[in-house]
């Protein structure tokens, strides 16, 4: 009996102060990985190819943006050092 091992690659990214071009490069990399993993899965499942380098791929990207609170009387709100908006007493 042959045991086939597969690996799982989990990519997690937090984008906060990145420029538009840096974000695009990150997304392009994620899409390339996804496309490669998908092609490997299809080859194994439908073409019965045994791929020693097969892997599962999962990714999460968190994008933080600056929130405007102008409608909430901005003089009463401020961002602290942990970027949480709190109300000034």
Image (cartoon, rainbow, N blue to C red):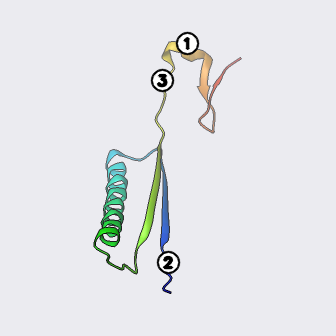
Question: Closer to the camera: disc 2 or disc 3?
Answer: 2
Q: CA separation, marks 1 and 3?
A: 11 Å
Category of crowding for the residue at label 2, using alpha-carbon neighbours closer than 10 angstroms: few (below 14), some (14–19), many (at least 20): few
Asked if marks 2 and 3 touch (Cβ < 8 Å), the reply is no
Q: Earlier in the sequence, mark 1 or mark 3?
A: 3
| Coordinates of residue 84 in the picture (x, y in percent) | 61, 33
Q: Which mark is residue 29?
A: none
| Coordinates of residue 62 in the picture (x, y in percent) | 48, 45
Q: Which residue is mark 3?
A: 68
Q: Quadrant of residue 85?
A: top right
Number of callouts? 3
Asked if marks 2 and 1 touch (Cβ < 8 Å), the reply is no
Q: Outermost residue toward the left?
A: 47
Q: Quadrant of the C terminus?
A: top right
Q: Residue at 49%, 77% (x, y): give it.
A: 5
Question: Closer to the camera: disc 2 or disc 1?
Answer: 2
Horizontal side, residue 57 vs residue 45: left or right: right
Q: Which mark is residue 73?
A: 1
Q: Secondary structure at mark 3?
A: loop
| Coordinates of residue 51 in the picture (x, y in percent) | 36, 78
Q: Earlier in the sequence, mark 2 or mark 3?
A: 2
Category of crowding for the residue at label 3, using alpha-carbon neighbours closer than 10 angstroms: few (below 14), some (14–19), many (at least 20): few
Towards the viewer: 60 or 46: 46
Horizontal side, residue 62 vs residue 89: left or right: left
Up-down relation of residue 88 to residue 7 (above or below): above
Up-down relation of residue 26 to residue 63 (above or below): below
Q: Secondary structure at mark 2?
A: loop
Q: Earlier in the sequence, mark 2 or mark 1?
A: 2
Q: CA separation, marks 2 and 3?
A: 49 Å
């Amino acid at each position: 009996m042959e045991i086939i091992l597969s690996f799982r690659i989990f990519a997690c990214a937090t984008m906060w102060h990145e420029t538009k071009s840096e974000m695009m490069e990150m997304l392009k990399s994620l899409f390339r990985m996804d496309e490669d993993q998908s092609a490997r899965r299809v080859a194994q499942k439908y073409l019965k190819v045994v791929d020693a380098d097969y892997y599962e791929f999962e990714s999460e990207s968190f994008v933080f943006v600056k929130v405007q609170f102008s409608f909430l009387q901005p003089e009463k709100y401020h961002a602290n050092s942990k970027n949480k908006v709190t109300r000034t007493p």
